[in-house]
Amino acid sequence: MSNTPVTEIITLTSNDAMKTTPKFQEAIELLRQSTLDGLQQMYWGDRVQQPGIRQWFINWDRRPQRSESTAPIAAQIKEKLEAVVDSPPTRRLVAFNPYPPTKCFAAPFTEVIISTVKPETDLNEFSKIVDASLEVCHDFKGCYGTAWGYVVGSEHVKEVVLLLGWESPEHHVAFMKTEPARITTAPYVEGVEDSTVFYVQSQYA
């Protein structure tokens, strides 16, 4: 799994310093200028419905590894982020297919769905359900692309993350009213315990 390309999703519950100081941009710059192996593209944006929550997406061509050589830069980034958040950041590593999920982040709006899979759900069957639910989006007007993957490294809870690029939230709402969307969404909902859904207007970092 260490050689699997992943996208790191960092969730930051912002305090006032996120808007009034350059700390977050300094954290991005520190990572960009670092010599960490595998770093690819970065994107970020605030949740449209919850502007106090910022999402940072980092594409890696392999799972990032902590080491003595990376500890100083990691400590500096941590210090920058701690200054702009009210609670510790949440970090997920997701093995998206397709990778990198560039089309989703290039869209005007990125829909993010984070779901906890029921323990009894058969993952082979569930993977087919996810594929089917996203496949019907591709030919719908306003959809830029989709990607999905499981969160890696979690032993106790199985999470899945879906990305969908949309021209606007209205295009997404219109899609959800179609018969293909209703047919393919129901089995997905049946296979998960809960879901968090939000939009981000991603910016290339």
Image: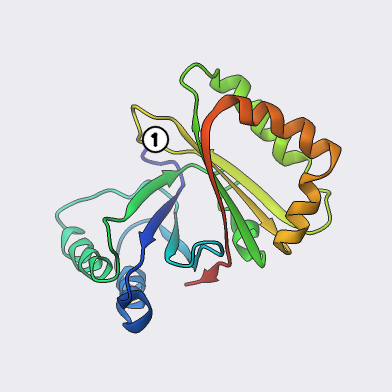
Name the residue located 79 percent from the left edge and 59 percent from the top edge: 142
Name the residue located 23 percent from the left edge and 63 percent from the top edge: 78
Name the residue located 35 percent from the left edge and 33 percent from the top edge: 154
Residue 14 visible at all: yes
What x and y, as percent, mark residue 10?
39, 56
Q: Which quarter of the figure is the N terminus placed in?
A: top left
**Left-right relation of 146 to 153:** right
Observer-nearest of 58 and 51: 51
Name the residue located 19 percent from the left edge and 51 percent from the top edge: 67
Q: Secondary structure at mark 1?
A: loop
**Left-right relation of 21 to 51:** left
Local crowd size for mark 1, using a 10 Å CA cut-off: few (<14), some (14–19), many (≥20): few
Q: Which residue is mark 1?
A: 1
What x and y, as percent, mark residue 192?
55, 29
* Residue 177 sits in quarter: top right
What x and y, as percent, mark residue 47?
51, 62
Residue 138 visible at all: no
What x and y, as percent, mark residue 76?
20, 68
- Amino acid carrying label 1: it is Met
Taking 113 as reference, is 160 above or below it? Answer: above
**Left-right relation of 75 to 20:** left
